[in-house]
Image: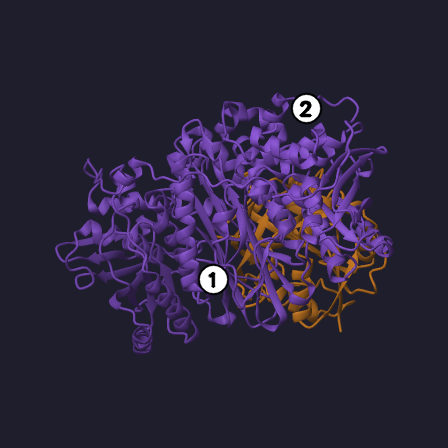
Amino acid sequence: MLRVAVVRFPGSNCDWDAYHAVANAGAEARFVWHRDTDLQQADVVILPGGFSYGDYLRSGAIARFSPVMQAVQRHAAEGGAVLGICNGFQILCEARLLPGALVRNDRLTFVSRPVWVRVERTDTFCTTAYARGTEIRIPVAHGDGCYVADDDTLRMLEAEGRVVLRYIRGENPNGSVADIAGVSNAAGTVVGFMPHPERYADPLTGSDVGAGFFQSIAEWLPGRATRSTP
Amino acid sequence: MTTAVPVTHAASFPGERPVTMEVVREHNLTAFEWDRIVAMLGRKPTLTELGVFSALWSEHCSYKHSKPVLKRFPTTGPQVIQGPGENAGVLRLPNGWAVAFKIESHNHPSAVEPYQGAATGVGGILRDVFTMGARPVAVLNSLRFGPLTEPRNRYLFAGVVRGVGDYGNCIGVPTLGGEVGFAPGYSGNPLVNAMCVGILREADLATARAHGVGNVLLNVGAKTGRDGIHGASFASEELSEKSEARRPQVQVGDPFTEKLLLEASLELITSKLIVAIQDMGAAGLTSSSAEMAARGGVGVELDTGLVPTREPGMTPYEILLSESQERMLVVAEPHQVAAIQAVCRKWELEATDIGRVTDDGLFRVKHDGLTVVEIPGQPLVDDCPIYTPEAREAPAAAARRKAKPTQPPRAGVDEALEALLDTPSIASKRWVYEQYDSTVQASTMLGPGGDAGVFRVGTEPFALAVSVDCNNRLVALDPYEGGKATVAEAARNVACTGAEPLGVTDCLNFGNPEKPEVFFQFIEACRGISDACRAFGTPVTGGNVSFYNESPTGAVDPTPTIGMVGLLRRAEDRVPSHFRAIGDRIVIVGGSEGALGGSAYWAELCDFFGGAGPTVDLDHEARLQQFLVAVAAARLVRSAHDCSEGGLAVALAEAAIGGPYADRGFGAIVDLRSYAPALHAVQALYGEDHGRVVLSVAPAALPGLRALLTRHGLQGYLAGEVQEPGGDLQIVLPDSVHRWPIDRLRSVYDDAIPRRMREVVSDRAEA
């Protein structure tokens, strides 16, 4: 069974949500504490949402220095899969595992609502269950979700097809450049996005359109080259 | 009264001011209370002792004006595990689960410092719930402000919403609902009531009773600073121009520490490492330790010199009365201390030994070896004088019920609906709740924007519904009927989702109880609440009284907010509030006499507050609730929406406009010719009779619905049909036909608050 480590930082608050979504999809979920440096042979690491270390200084800025992040860095460097959701995405950007940065929403307030996004990259470990171009509505809930990057980085992301999720139908909730909701590294092994598919993984609680991300993970074969076309 | 009490000794702390009558007055204690203190001690208190008395004998802690009235609430029932008197009330749920819930006010701090005042209000209520051993799973809030035409009110509104949001969002507890009202009476004195709902295994229930002589008192969590000193006393006086100077007494919240405290507390409780636990809330270390000791019938000895402080040189007076946030007092057996400290360390928190449980019944505080406080514990908590002030209705209030509007409405019958939907109290609160995380914990089934929030409990088959309500206009008009109406509306909202109302927590916001007209409102509203709770079988399990909500312009409208919890036995039976399918039939349950007294129509269109309000038929309301639960369980309705402020036209418009994320509202045609044959159009459309709901029903379900209506002795009116999205809302009356494009109504409803708040950025600079 595929093994998923869900990292718990002090201040993580979507840790259980991610854990349940993974377990319900049929993978084995385990928590890893922020002080741990052993990922317990995880195939996939999830950095869940929340306010790690209170998000003091900058969202994700302190978490990147935690002991567990040294292990996550090694895991990623060896080609291991890492998914960052919301605060997890912020941490991945702070840790330079993903390009760009997440800054204060353009409306200057926290925003919590379901938004329409398009799945634009479907060959990563967490998006294979979706057809390319699939449009789904899943919740966002963040204060610092405005994705920014310099022009060269943006050109590279677009040219290499590394935008994983994009806000559509005029529903960009935070002012992100090019309506970017989530990006990946070049190999597609590190993915981060702001929306919370784990909250829409059950038809009773809103919708189950987000379950596909966790089914993708559960069915993913580690070691398989995830990148088919550039 | 106090009987024989031991002789006690305490010394002044070096540098302390002498206790003069001037100092006593500064501490908000009366000459009568002073005499009682001296009699109890057989001597004059030290300044530190005076501080302790002023906190515990403040209105906020002692309930000295409300206790006899609160005793009349029904508080028992087969579902009650814990009634009033603990940190939160607890009700029994299926399969070994229980729900802990409570509502509390943070009005005064929010009036002078809206962001921190509101944030720490949320923090405090979360702690009340997780100290019971419950994991917080939902937050709700009830807010009142003056009109948004004034920049100061916009500033307070924006700050409070941001404070509530930032705290709850960081902790990861979804905000599932609430209410926001705007009226001139709240201009100088906004109301900020926060409710928290938590879930626990009944077997894990924790209490705040200190016992076991020799057990250790541990200070857990944040360090103690000089913030919030005398917060409890501040909450117990009227607001004035001088209140701005109270700003430093407003505590500052740190939700990150709170999250750690939450996790650590739950781990300590479920691993059975501790004897008792209590939040250091109002009056901080003083009230938490004195109240825990009094509940357990023991004494305590604290050494304030051991309490970790943020700055050196804090006096025992300051340490005892600080309301620094995110602190807990834990009672533990000595051999568990090391294990407790290990759990706390894991969550990056300190747990410091600061005292002992004693057998002498005294509340004793030492500092650097000097005994600075020694007071008999039980009398300290229980012997605060209880006052029963005179209660007399103001003649103007009685006259108001006989009055009629003197000026014609500012708009015609059709325009009135738009005007009502544009009223911030009625309009969509999306501007508010989109700043609150409402989906974290992945259990939200019905979020904000409907009648009640509904959430799942793990993978259990059942769900819970929660709502907070208060129609302050109806309470101001007639406190008894208004009290009944408030409970009825909360229960109806919960029942609309298909849940059976289980129990109540209340936040009673009133003016100065020493004024006869205010105390009249208080006792009458409480009588109404009691009668309604008895009729519905929903006991009161706790809550909070907030008096002295007065600014130089007068008292606030009496606002007894009711928080209701309901049980939905099968989660998948939940019923949303909005129309869902073309061709569904629209059924109105409950009749109308066109009651305009105290209505939003008269307030908004005629600038008039008065008239005879509608009376609440409690028997009808109870049957209506049971009917709503039965139709949901039988899957006979597609939507159910309560009819309240703005009357039937507003209820129909809201159901048709749809949820906040619907692509488009539905059209609807509604024929009220046989429903209200004798009423004037304004009465039929905007009258606010109680006991009514708007249902949408698939045609095939109508026979089943009729059978259940009959069984519950209710009148239902097949009034119309849901039509295509983007169509008109059309209402046919005996002498007129009214038609509104639904897209237009929706944009008015959605934009009412945002368009008033667009100037808020400039307000911040002003304020």
Is there any visible trace of residue B213 in the rendered image? yes
* Quadrant of image for the N terminus of chain B: top right
Task: Please state if B519 lies on the left or on the right of B381 as rendered.
Answer: left
Answer with mark 1 or mark 2, whichever residue precedes in sequence.
2
Crowding at label 1, few (<14), some or many (≥20) Cα neighbours within 10 Å? many
Chain letter, purple: B
Q: Amino acid at mark 1?
A: Thr
Q: Nearer the viewer, mark 1 or mark 2?
A: 2
Chain letter, orange: A
Could you tell me how far apart the alpha carbons at marks 1 and 2 are, in whole angstroms?
Answer: 48 Å
The answer to whether any part of residue B250 appears in the image is no
Say which residue label 2 marks. Answer: B19
Task: Name the residue beneath numbered marker 1.
Answer: B538
Residue A17 position, x and y percent, is 65, 61
Residue displayed at 59% across by 40% down: B384
User: What SS does tag 1 mark?
Assistant: loop
- Chain assignment, label 1: B
Q: Residue at x 16, y 51 (%)?
A: B680
Work out whether B70 lies above or below A121.
above
Colouring style = by chain
Q: Is residue B183 above or below residue B655?
A: above
Q: Is residue B276 left or right of residue B173?
A: right
Q: Check disc 2 and report its element: helix, strand or loop.
A: loop
Q: Chain of mark 2?
A: B
Farthest-out residue, front? B4
Q: Position of residue B47 (x, y in %)?
A: 70, 28
Looking at the image, residue B238 sits to the left or right of residue B329; the answer is left
Q: Is residue B714 left or right of residue B318?
A: left
| Residue at 76% across, 29% down | B315
Q: Is residue B210 above or below residue A175?
A: below
Mark 2: which amino acid? Val
